[in-house]
Image: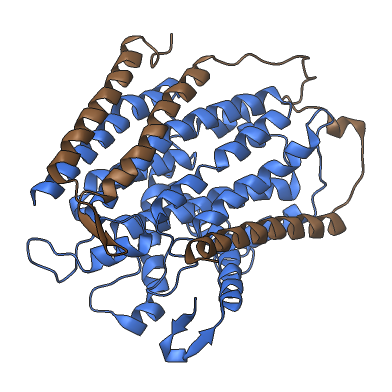
Amino acid sequence: MTEFYRNYLAVAVLIGAALLMVGAMLGAGRLIRPTRPQPEKYVTYESGSDPVAGWGQSNVRYFIYALLFLMFDVEAVFIFPWAVSLDPVVVNGTTVGGLGVFGVVEMTVFILLLALGLVYAWRKGVLRWA
Amino acid sequence: MIASLSPFALELGWGTTMAIKTLVVLAIIPAGALILGYVFLLKIMSHMQSRLGPMDPGGFHGWYQLVGDGLKFLQKEDVMPAKADRRVFAAAPAVVVLSTFLVFAVIPMGPDLVVKNLDVGVFYALAVSSLSVIGVLMAGWASANKFALLGALRAAAQLIAYELPLLLAVVGVVIQAGTMSLQGIVFSQQNGEIFGWDFIGNPFILTQFVGFALFLVAAQAELTQTPFDMPVAESELVSGYMVEYTGFRFLFFFIGEFGTAFGFAALAATLFLGGWSIPGVDGDWANILGPFVLFAKLMLVAFLMFWVRFTYPRLREDQLQALAWKFLIPIGFANILVTGALKVAF
């Protein structure tokens, strides 16, 4: 197993440990806590009054925010590798990165294009609540 | 990989080291949540608002109050609404706690004290910390409760909107350090210099103060703390997505919230304040003093975050979204471009 996979094996171990802890705490709770079922306890809580059937409405804007987010989040995936390759680094004997001025100009163009998307959404009134 | 901590001449195998590190992380998260909860929520908040806070349990300034509160949850009945989606409802708190846990895998506490010094450290930390959105949405949806669903949608919209300024604030640091590894970022602050003057190294708060401010504001929103607490607004949504949770499952959300606050404070301290390093301390001493130094810096950052939490009123949902999209994100982009240009110029 290479060092790379070993690093992520550690992450897997932590996931296991976290789930184990949650399980152990809930298990301990199960032994200690009382269980006295009454039908009223399992009614949906709506501040004490009888629950009204059906789903409430929610604003469609949340969906649009999700779309906006998607655009910028994918872009962040491109910005991070760019951020570490401005200066040249030596990896396994070969020099990589060192984008320098070229990199900064390219990123400026890229970010301006994306900012245009934000400006479009802004002008369209997506960010304003009627 | 062999961990070496020379003053104790320990030579441990991968499994043993990993087991010890896992146990330490398991201990840090509830301990961190308790410390923040006690120091800030019970004491500093009370004093800022001219009250004493709990004084009786445990004798000294009511230190036992929070432990008692935690244990109380252990003996609470487990109530799951009849209409809830049972499996998703049960899994949601675990997802939230899991995302808190994974952040601590990359936070270094000394030159050798880190669970795994991943090459993509910061990126990984931000990625796993945003997993909690999924847990929140699961909780809100599975509760089959209108208030919970509203809270979850608000939370999801807020967490994703402020995820971006958080990422963009960090990019400036990554550009300056030239690496995404948190250990590498600490070293580059330790060995950096400001105009040839290198006594205190170059803590990035000096050159990246815009990033630091962005990071704190965005972290505040990620933690759904006032003024960004629309998702859990007690007066309207009665705790939003957590409304149907009882007992230990509810406590997991609490641990998740304060554990993540601990994690974000540690991240901010590592990225901007030099992490475990302190001028003039090197080698083995850095391993011994590192955790304490990091803890001191972390508490300083946490104090700032909680100070804001106790001082400001809640923002309206549209103001909250407008702040992220119209101000923080453009500022974040400008910060990246300026940092990049300066990095190339000098």
**Where on the picture, by quarter, is residue B325?**
top left
Q: Position of residue A118 (x, y in %)?
A: 32, 20
- Residue at horizontal 51 percent and vertical 51 percent from the top: B260
Task: Give B244 or B24, whichever is nearer the viewer.
Answer: B24
In front: B329, or B237? B329
Residue in view at x 56 percent, y 56 percent: B101
**Does residue B110 appear to the left or right of B280 in the view shown?**
right
In the image: residue B133, left or right of residue B148: left
**Relative to residue B286, is residue A81 depicted above or below?**
above
Looking at the picture, tell me which residue is in the foreground, A100 or A52: A100
B84 to the left or right of B294: right
Q: Let me know if residue B63 appears in the view.
A: no
Identify by letter the chain in blue: B
Residue A60: horizontal and vertical position, in percent? 53, 14
* Picture layout, residue A111 above or below residue B213: above
**Which chain: brown?**
A
Q: Residue at x 41, y 56 (%)?
A: B121
In the current view of this chain or complex, which residue is farthest to the front?
A: A94
Residue at (90, 47) in percent of width and height: A35
Q: Is residue A9 visible?
A: yes
Residue B172 appears at what percent x and percent y? 26, 46
Q: Position of residue B132 (x, y in %)?
A: 56, 42
